[in-house]
Image (cartoon, helix red, strand yellow):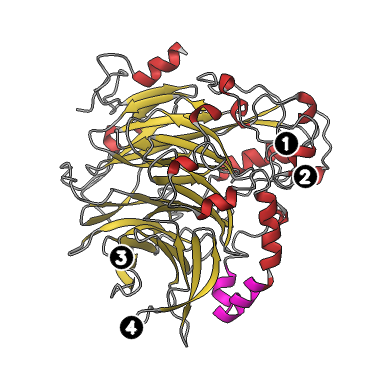
Amino acid sequence: MLLSKMAAEGGGKEMNEIKTQFTTREGLYKLLTHSEYSRPNRVPFNSQGSNPVRVSFVNVNDQSGNGDRLCFNVGRELYFYIYKGVRKAADLSKPIDKRIYKGTQPTCHDFNHLTATAESVSLLVGFSAGQVQLIDPIKKETSKLFNEERLIDKSRVTCVKWVPGSESLFLVAHSSGNMYLYNVEHTCGTTVPHYQLLKQGESFAVHTCKSKSTRNPLLKWTVGEGALNEFAFSPDGKFLACVSQDGFLRVFNFDSVELHGTMKSYFGGLLCVCWSPDGKYIVTGGEDDLVTVWSFVDCRVIARGHGHKSWVSVVAFDPYTTSVEESDPMEFSGSDEDFQDLHFGRDRANSTQSRLSKRNSTDSRPVSVTYRFGSVGQDTQLCLWDLTEDILFPHQPLSRARTHTNVMNATSPPAGSGGTNPGSNGNSITTPGNSVPPPLPRSNSLPHSAVSNAGSKSSVMDGAIASGVSKFATLSLHDRKERHHEKDHKRNHSMGHISSKSSDKLNLVTKTKTDPAKTLGTPLCPRMEDVPLLEPLICKKIAHERLTVLIFLEDCIVTACQEGFICTWARPGKVGLLSSQNQANSPSGTVV
């Protein structure tokens, strides 16, 4: 406990100094000052009133072995560099591409990892006035501009992402609370689009674009109240997690336009969201200064983390530090077929995927998993967190554990059927007396239980990543509408399983404008004492301005602040060629 507090506080007089290194159980992380990317003049950007600095990466499989490319926006400017990471110092004098925009600012961007080559990359850029641009920063071509006349949406683009597994479909979220599905091959039309209702549910509606010829947008999603701040696709591309200014996390089956589950922030808007590498957990951050861990399987909050002193702007899992430990062979009721590989997204960590898959599919041994995730906030602090099995499976009886397959199982019984298992706990909410775990909980080597995907509809999750999404590109809108109507009964049946733990869950979601106090204490938003409270492994001030980027790469962690500085933190043992150049020699060292 004492060590944890010291790590979180960083010592007394040093608290306001910017840290250039920190230590976790893996070892020492070091800031590589010569691997800092920024505008070529290295002058701090006056960030008042500007959009957050964002960073996107892509690997172009360059023959030289230096295939990483980096894109970031600062104010009205957009830069595209070769990213040399921990290997070589950054050369800011030679951006591959630089663009300066007038009248609007870039707000977010995303590379298509499927189509990227050393000669060509497809980069989507969203703007503060609502447009989306498709550019190729290698060929220096501006391919297309979507929503050019702002007829589709006039509000700021908050998030843009390629649909996983697709070379042509992309999704765009706006501060209006709307999301739009586009196809790069289609035009946007010269008139305001007319829409036809496709699907309506609790606090969301999805419309198709009504026109004689196919045009963008293919779909319009209206989600919740207020701005839609961020969305993230599940690693297999089948589900979509959205966080909104109304404080709600909403998780959809992307292809069937089905609401899978919801969660409400403790207070204020939710600003960021991410998935665990295996798709079983979602972490959000927001204006309540908390990180919240939500179980995709059980559709409930399983932990909150408190370490930030202001709004949390980014959350991200570290797939390279997720640890897997084999336990002694145990008796299981499941067959060998139950032990299936994890299915990560195409751009996820291959090393982690193979490591977890091998450990998980070789025999009937249970595995114990520790998930690592990180968060950065407007308090200029970086926090790292470990999600361990004493949090994932609190007070688990051994007899109950033996009746289930392991934590990586993708085909367990549906959520809500847990009541039939011996010793199962219906609501699985920890009692107040046991709500605070030890600061650095270690694996207790118990096998895992009751981790499942909800209902029969998720049993297809081991299919091809793009199988469902690609249908949007081939079906006409009319065919798609009929297909969804045919599935209505089956989908509604699935919802029964998901909501069985709380019969009033669905009713609560419809009342997004009600007093937040009415959701407090329900499964949508448990009270603080009803769920475990995580303490950060480390909590360090690493910048002068608010932090807006956190990306975990194989040999480093990348952060960025609103001044426009993109920093590279070498993982333990990965300092490489820059170790002699790094000025950080003490934990209290400051950036010179």
Say which of 307 and 555 sits in front: 307
Chain part drawn in magenta? 470-485
Residue at 55 percent across and 68 percent down: it is 199
Disc 2/disc 1 C-alpha distance (Å): 9 Å
Percent position of residue 530, x then y: 55, 29
Q: Are marks 3 and 4 in contact (CB under 8 Å)?
A: no
Q: Nearer the viewer, residue 1 or 585?
A: 1
Q: Position of residue 463 (x, y in %)?
A: 67, 58
What kind of element bears circle 2? helix
Is 143 contained in the magenta span? no
Residue located beneath label 4 in the image = 190
Q: Earlier in the sequence, mark 4 or mark 2?
A: 4
Q: x and y percent of residue 134 in the render?
A: 35, 67
- Asked whether the viewer can see residue 319, the reply is no
| Front: mark 1 or 4 | 4
Instruction: Determine whether, in the image, residue 204 is placed left or right of residue 370.
Output: left
Assign a secondary structure to mark 4: loop
Residue placed under numbered mark 1 in the picture: 406
The residue sitting at 50% across, 32% down in the picture is 527
